[in-house]
Amino acid sequence: MAGRAEKTLAEGLAAMGMDFPEVPLYIKNNLSPRFQIREYQEEAFQYSIYYIEHMAGGRQIHLLYHMATGSGKTYIMAGMILYYYKHGYRNFLFFVDQKPIVEKTKENFINKTFGKYLFPEKIVMDGKTVEMKTVENFQDCDKEAVNIKFTTVQQLHEDLNRVRENSTTIQDYEARKTVFIADEAHHLNAGTKKSKEEKKTEESWENSVDRIFKANKENVMLEFTATCDLKNENIYEKYRDKIIYDYPLLKYREEGYTKEFLNLQSAFGPLERTIQAMLLSQYRLKLFELHGRRVKPVILLKSRTVAESREFFQMFADYMADSFGPEDIEKIRRNAAGIVKRMFEFFKEREISDQDLAAELRQAFSAEHLIFIDSRDKNLSEKQKKVNDLENPYNPYRMIFTVDMLSEGWDVLNLFDIVRLYDTRQRGTNISKTTIQEAQLIGRGVRYCPFKLEESQDAFKRKYDEEPENEMRVCETLYYHSRQDSSYIQELHQELKEIGFEPEKDAKFAAGVKEKFKNNDPHKKGRVFENKQIKVNLSSSAKDFSEAEERVIKVSEYAAGHYPVVYKALRQYPVFRFNRLSGYYPHLTGIKEFITSEKYAGQFRLHIVTDGPPTNLDYYEAFLYFFGELAEKIQNS
């Protein structure tokens, strides 16, 4: 918004530089003591109340809270419900784009046994106990309670345009003043982005919401989103005088309320990346236990398609039950660097053998501790509740398999590892849709997992930014496990900048060249040489190549004598399952033919460089890299 002359409402309030009145005790005392009110949340309440009571001037209240994912928008909703109840409102309509978010928020507001219930056991206002109730309509609601109708914006639109039993009508909102609470409100702006012609021909959800809001001048609209497209001039103009609080993700991160983020790249295939994440997860578990904290770290495995996710889920469960062992841990150790190396030093200091560690991981990540999420699942609602309660020590799950079911409305704090199970990128655009989804998922995953080891520490903020060597630093960092791919990583970080999680570090400037230099020979006749990066297959364990050995092997010839090594590398990539591979090659008769035949993978040669005679593991890693490249080419062909 730099360069725009008109300030937003929030910017205008901030520029006033005044001490706003304290947040009323009837709000503070009736929010759950489990959640400590943060400075910016207190400021959001202060801005809201001051504007409503001193600046609105009789205008209908319509406000937007543009706040980062994880910053506590639902907490602000709860406080504003208390504020409006105090001021005579009894009817509240909560609506959002996705049904799972409806169910999650209902738990936040209504279920007293839920770990994230936002109110105390008893809400007391003016000496009276206030109940939170769900209703289907406002016709027979309790005049002493907070009555909340939870719905989706689609269902709301349908109810207004097709009257049915128990549905709300336009007359309900004309006759009874109502507070509208719109979560993920960027979905309401579809109509705003459209042309005048499209607006005339389509009765959009946005128009339906606008119609019922304006049905009664005492109705109130409170919108909440982390991703309002304020770069769009139409949307900016619509919300400029409604943005009551603006707390972007970058500021949220800089003030220490998020985990840090690190991309852990490797030449590993999907299974090895997952095993590395499991080891780090167990490392964190032990660190938390060492300091007397009961935190269960969880891992999310992201696939490109539901079919791939289901396939990997089954393969992984079978592998953990039948094949996983100390040799899998040894593979990770051989390539250990940075935090992974430190992790292995921790295990060694505590005399935890690979055998013991493998036994722990087999149990911790056995089938009963894995959960697969699919939008078509008959038990989706129940599964959504389970993945929204992962912080509960009694929740059994340590690993989630998904595609994009958790892109919005997911507020789990104990996610520390995201594993990207695929190695391909979509072509044809500067930044692919997949990469954008990944950046958004990372934005949700960096929510800070609160803990403190000393009384003086703030449980909700990072503590070790100035102590990078502190062992607990890993417990406030989200690791994103992906394959080494410089182009993809550049895309990912560009998109993280777009969503506001990473700052723009590049500065543009102009440098003049003196006329004296322009006239000399080097400038007139000089040549510029450019290095070209050439990709080679190197053993990542190699440290000194003074005695390097180079070998060129043909896939078909090597596979003839070492088929199990080649096959194990190939099976890390779901595209090489026969049922999928035969879709690309209709005449293929089996996986062995694909590996050994000159028509298929057998025709290729691998150039391998190692710091000594290559071992089976060196060959395995070379084939792992080769099949990763081949998988990308096949899927993008």
Image (spheres, helix red, strand yellow):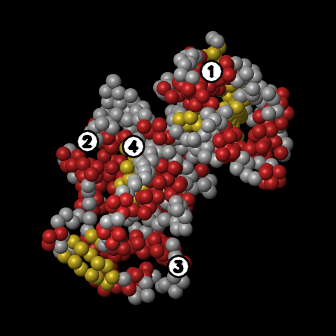
**Mark 1 surroundings: few (<14), some (14-19) or many (≥20) residues within 10 A:** some
Identify the secondary structure beneath mark 1: helix
Identify the secondary structure beneath mark 4: strand
Q: Indicate the position of residue 272 as horizontal and vertical percent values.
A: 35, 61
Under mark 3, the amino acid is Tyr
Q: Which residue is mark 1?
A: 50
Q: Residue lying farthest left?
A: 547
Under mark 4, the amino acid is Glu
Name the foreground residue: 78 vs 371: 78
Residue 260: mark: 4
Disc 4 or disc 3, which is closer to the eye?
4
Which mark sits nearer the N-terminus, 1 or 2? 1
Q: Residue at x 56, y 52 (%)?
A: 405
Q: Which residue is mark 3?
A: 584
**Label 1 to label 2: alpha-carbon separation:** 45 Å
Q: Residue at x 20, y 44 (%)?
A: 350
Q: Are marks 2 and 3 in contact (CB under 8 Å)?
A: no
Under mark 2, the amino acid is Glu
**Label 4 to label 2: alpha-carbon separation:** 14 Å
Which mark sits nearer the N-terminus, 2 or 3? 2
**Label 4 to label 3: alpha-carbon separation:** 41 Å
